[in-house]
Image: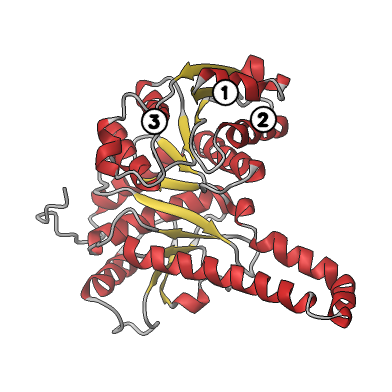
Amino acid sequence: MSLPRIAIDAMGGDEGVRVMIEGAALARRRHDKFKFLLVGDEPKIKAALANHPGMTGASEILHCDDVVEGDEKPSRALRRAKTTSMGLAVNAVKKGDAGAAVSAGNTGALMAMSKLALRTLPGIDRPALAALLPTLGDNDVIMLDLGANRECDARNLVQFAIMGAAYARILTGLSEPRVRLLNIGTEENKGTEDLQDAAAQLRAASGLAMRFDGFVEADKINRGEVDVVVTDGFSGNIALKAIEGAARFVTDLLRNAFTSSLRSKVGFLVSRPATELLRHHLDPNNHNGAVFLGLNGVVVKSHGSANALGVANAVTVAARLLEESLIERISGDVGALEHRGAATIDRSIDLA
């Protein structure tokens, strides 16, 4: 099967061109059908491609030496969308020159550019940022929104649930992924009015390709008991940072413990296979590739500090979403829900 090529913002991320090209090359070694539009400074891209001869015939370069800075305000970056590597990569999706875009640059700027260029799908009010988190179960858990929307009403949360379930069906192969709303308790009377309204709508909806299981508390996100966790962007971003911080705390604590004495160093050698497995499981590069769900196009955000493996995983996520027709799935699910009128959602609220 021939895939649409993937636009790579080669200038984004902490290390820029070298890691982005190396990651794309690694993804192509895994799947030789990948083709790329590499957007960025042409001399730097060509220098990086010299180390990956297999990429030359699969890549086209779109020269651009203007870069969105990591701390740049989205509003300013948006005004430079036609001149920056990030903006041109997203615009390539809009024009049909690429099927998806991957960037490791400024998240706020990428969301603003993507929303303006691609717009949201019919029936979707706001896009949401979804990412994979490790669990104790067989599959990663998908969590959204992770920062695209600070405040969300019940309608937004219902839409996020539908989008997250469509994404989960692609990644996990489950026909009815387990979906829960993040809350301060699992009882039906807990949480805000919007959370309770969204839960009521999801319980009442029939025929959705998901299993709505009510609420989940933050300490259960990684237990493997849920496939999709839905929340507003403010709470989601806090929860994500807390989980990432806890993972770093555990690994640093183990490192300090194993180097504190000669006996502990011997203990480390004995337990090294187990600690390596833990390190691998918690390594964010193995779960890299957040997706802006709800847009009329595929845009994947790679972590700014991702290494080549992380970038390769982000590219692979983008390709898989194209292969599995994510946009069409979301459109079909939202359209079916609205057609059945299973959930009563107030359309009078202006969310623009």
Q: Is residue 4 visible?
A: no
Name which of mark 3 and mark 2 comes first in the sequence.
2
Which is more toward the observer, 85 or 337? 85
Q: Which element type, helix, strand or loop, lies under badge 2? A: helix
Crowd band around label 3 with a 10 angstrom C-alpha radius: few (<14), some (14–19), many (20+): many
Q: Which element type, helix, strand or loop, lies under badge 3? A: helix
Q: Is residue 85 visible?
A: yes
**273 displayed left or right of 104:** right
Proximity of marks 1 and 3: CB atoms separated by less than 8 Å: no
Residue 90: numbered disc: 3
Which is more toward the observer, 4 or 250? 250
Whole-number angstrom distance, CA of label 2 to CA of label 1 = 15 Å
The residue lying at 63 percent from left, 21 percent from top is 47
Q: Residue furthest front?
A: 261
**248 displayed left or right of 196:** right
Instruction: Give the vertical position of 267 relative to 46 (above or below).
Output: below
Quarter of image, res 50: top right
Please name the residue that numbered disc 2 is placed on: 25
Quarter of image, res 145: bottom left
Question: Label 1 sits on what residue type?
Answer: Lys
Whole-number angstrom distance, CA of label 3 to CA of label 2 = 20 Å
Q: Quadrant of the N terminus?
A: top right
The residue lying at 46 percent from left, 32 percent from top is 100
Please name the residue that numbered disc 1 is placed on: 44
Name which of mark 1 and mark 3 comes first in the sequence.
1
Question: Label 3 sits on what residue type?
Answer: Val
The residue lying at 53 percent from left, 69 percent from top is 245
Quarter of image, res 74: top left
The residue lying at 39 percent from left, 30 percent from top is 90
Question: Label 2 sits on what residue type?
Answer: Ala
